[in-house]
Amino acid sequence: MPIEDILDLHTFIPKDIPDLLVDYFEACIDADIYSVRIVHGKGRGILKKRVQELLKQNQMVESFRNAPPEAGGWGATLVELKR
């Protein structure tokens, strides 16, 4: 998988997401990427809530927020990683 500033979770199964986020963030930091957009989709908000709970616990995450409408709105989260 290419390491970019966007991670689309639609193709992953939910049980893989905790490890995926850790591995992806480590790869981003190694590639000097510190701003990442996570696309989790809108749906009922279950995956979004799970992702944001994981972000709160992740030591590599400086901050995160809901994406603006032009970047996915409710269906995406913007993450700033620690430098």
Image: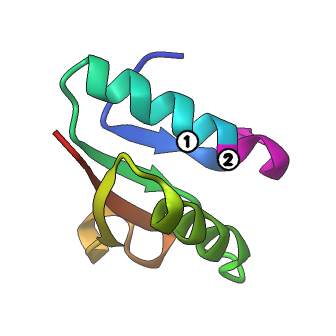
In-front residue for pair 9/69 = 9
Q: Which mark is residue 18?
A: 2
Instruction: From this view, report whether residue 1 is shown above or below residue 40.
Output: above
Span of residues in magenta? 10-18
Q: Position of residue 60 (x, y in %)?
A: 36, 46
Q: Quadrant of the N terminus?
A: top right
Residue at point 68%, 67% (across, down): 47
Is the magenta region chiefly helix, strand or loop?
helix
* Label 1 sits on residue: 21
46 displayed left or right of 55: right
Q: Secondary structure at mark 2?
A: helix
Q: Residues within 10 Å of mark 1 (few under 14, many from 20)?
A: some
Q: CA distance from mark 1 to mark 2?
A: 5 Å
Residue 42, x across and y down, in percent: 59, 74
Quarter assignment of residue 32: top left
29 w.r.t. 48: above or below: above
Q: Is residue 69 left or right of residue 25?
A: left
